[in-house]
Image: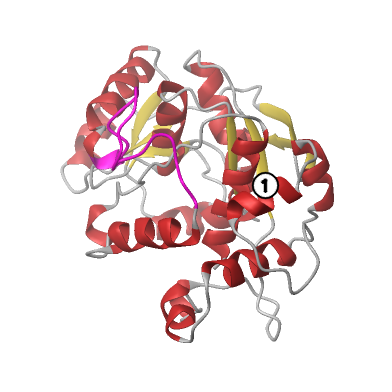
Amino acid sequence: MGNLRTALLAWLCARLEQGCFILRIEDLDLPRVRFGATERMLYDLRWLGLDWDEGPDCGGPHAPYTQSERLHHYHTYLKQLEQADLIYPCYCSRAEIVHAASAPQQGAEDGPRYPGTCRNLSTRQRQERARVRQPSLRFRVPEKSVIRFNDLVAGPVEQDVGQVVGDFIVRRSDGIFAYQFAVVVDDALMRINQVVRGVDLLSSAARQLLLFRVLGFPEPTFAHMPLIMDNDTGKRLSKRDGSMGLAPLRAAGQTPQHIIGQLATSCGLIPDGTLLTPSQLLSACHRSLYDIMAKITL
């Protein structure tokens, strides 16, 4: 339900600005992709009445819209970073990073700050470590790495990427491109100018803006929306915890108008108990995008 509310808000933002709503399937971590998950997601969005202008099923000028089909783009821009000496191989395991970090600073969901263990290894040291472990590739964060931006919901944000996160992974040791890197390339090539997503990804924005700048891409604006929280525990709803999706609500007789009304009510856009379609919600929200954002608080 939290993902669906964020999708509704992203759709609403795009429509209020007379922009395009773009749907991208982020399936880079193929071993974790559940069979049929994409199809179920597309079905749920259509059932709710949310439409998109570009996406995996309808195409568009920047196809393909599925990340696992876009690997050639990631290789191209990884090569650009390599030629600028902005990436290097890292042989550290997560456990080793935790052990090496004294008084570690947390980079939100990403664990302790990377201490730079492999940053300046000699060629011989790299060869020796490569015999026992496949490396990941880390982005070499510049010395001056303070990123400031204004989030449309969270307000002014500042993060010193070097101090908070350190050099971060752009390709994992198993060869899978990291989310931080892939979404920057995709957003730039798809000409995304506004990113609307959950606040759990707010800590990622500074790293991504750093990559936008290094790669010479135009920077999008960001709007990080609040998550739906469990009333009893105060924690975010999670698929791992068996949080309710649409299937049981449909089986119980809930209509798309019920669901859209509940999602819009949960972030203060309409009075409680209102039943309406996304298009009716758009008509009811005859205000500017920034008025909508002002009503949503983290």
60 drawn magenta: yes
Name the spot of residue 64 as percent of width and height, x first. 27, 32
Q: Residue at x 27, y 44 (%)?
A: 176
* Quarter of the figure with the C terminus: bottom right
Q: Is residue 105 visible?
A: no
SS at badge 1: helix
Front position in the image: 143 or 292: 292
Say which residue appears at 30% left-offset and 33% top-offset. Answer: 59
Which residue lies under the disc numbered 1? Answer: 282
User: What residue span does the magenta drawing correspond to?
Assistant: 50-68
In the rendered structure, which amino acid carries the disc numbered 1?
Leu
Task: Residue 31 in the image: state x and y as whole percent.
Answer: 22, 58
Q: Quadrant of the N terminus?
A: bottom right
Q: Is residue 167 left or right of residue 40?
A: right
Q: Is 192 one of the magenta-colored residues?
A: no
User: In the image, what residue occupies the spot 74% across and 74% down?
Assistant: 273
Question: Residue 183 appears in which quarter of the rendering?
Answer: top left
Q: Is residue 144 visible?
A: yes
Q: Is residue 51 left or right of residue 166?
A: left
Which residue is drawn at the image coordinates 26% and 65% (left, top)? 34
* Residue 79 in the image, given as x and y percentages of width and height: 29, 19
Residue 44: give x, y in percent of width and height.
41, 63
What kind of secondary structure does the magenta stretch mostly adopt? loop
Q: Residue furthest left?
A: 131
